[in-house]
Amino acid sequence: QVQLVESGGGLVQPGGSLELSCIASGSIFRIVAMGWYRQAPGKERELVARVNAGGGTEYGDSVKGRFKISRDNALNPVYLQMNSLKAEDSAVYYCNLMGYRDYVNSMDVWGKGTLVTVSS
């Protein structure tokens, strides 16, 4: 059973910074990509940032230039540095892993989420 554990959420003032981290444990044959998504109350879950095994990154339009995703060589753990935070960044942030359990079986795993609140 693969598990993702997120940490680093909390309360921060507008303009402040936070760093989230996500560590995967369990039997993983190969990681294809790891990323962060967020969901605010009453809204759909949206992509924040994602990094693939080749190092390619993708960001949601609303966080470009403010957030940065990084990872160790093995794509685990993965970090999300969030700068210039705004009230609209408040949400539950979820870590996601896409990969393979073995040569054949793919997996799409989600963490339980960590709450980020941006408020004065």
Image (cartoon, rainbow, N blue to C red):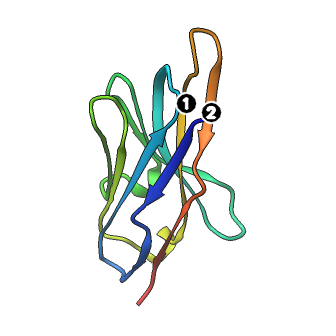
Q: At 36% across and 83% down in the image, what residue appears?
A: 13
Helix or strand or loop: what does disc 2 sit on?
strand
Front-most of residues 33 and 7: 7
Q: Quadrant of residue 109?
A: top right
Helix or strand or loop: what does disc 1 sit on?
strand
Q: Residue 108 shows which numbered tag?
A: 2
Residue 18 on image: x %, y % = 33, 67
Vertical position of residue 44 compared to residue 73: above or below: below
Number of residues whose C-alpha sits closer than 10 Å to that of mark 2, classed few (under 14), some (14–19) or many (20 or more)? some
Upstream in the sequence, badge 2 or badge 1?
A: 1
Q: Residue 69 shows which numbered tag?
A: none
Q: At 40% across and 56% down in the image, what residue appears?
A: 63
Real-space Cα separation, disc 2 to disc 1, in angstroms: 5 Å
Number of residues whose C-alpha sits closer than 10 Å to that of mark 1, classed few (under 14), some (14–19) or many (20 or more)? some
Q: Residue furthest bottom?
A: 120
Residue 66 on image: x %, y % = 31, 59
Q: Give the residue type that dot 2 points to.
A: Asp
Q: Which residue corresponds to mark 1? A: 98
Compared across the picture, whether 98 is left or right of 18 comes to right
Q: Give the residue type that dot 1 points to.
A: Met
Vertical position of residue 77 compared to residue 104: above or below: below
Kindly indicate whether the residue at mark 1 contacts the one at mark 2 (C-beta within 8 angstroms). yes
Q: Residue furthest right?
A: 42
Q: Residue furthest top?
A: 103
Vertical position of residue 64 compared to residue 70: above or below: below
Placement of the C terminus among the 4 image quadrants: bottom left
Q: At 52% across and 34% down in the image, what residue appears?
A: 26
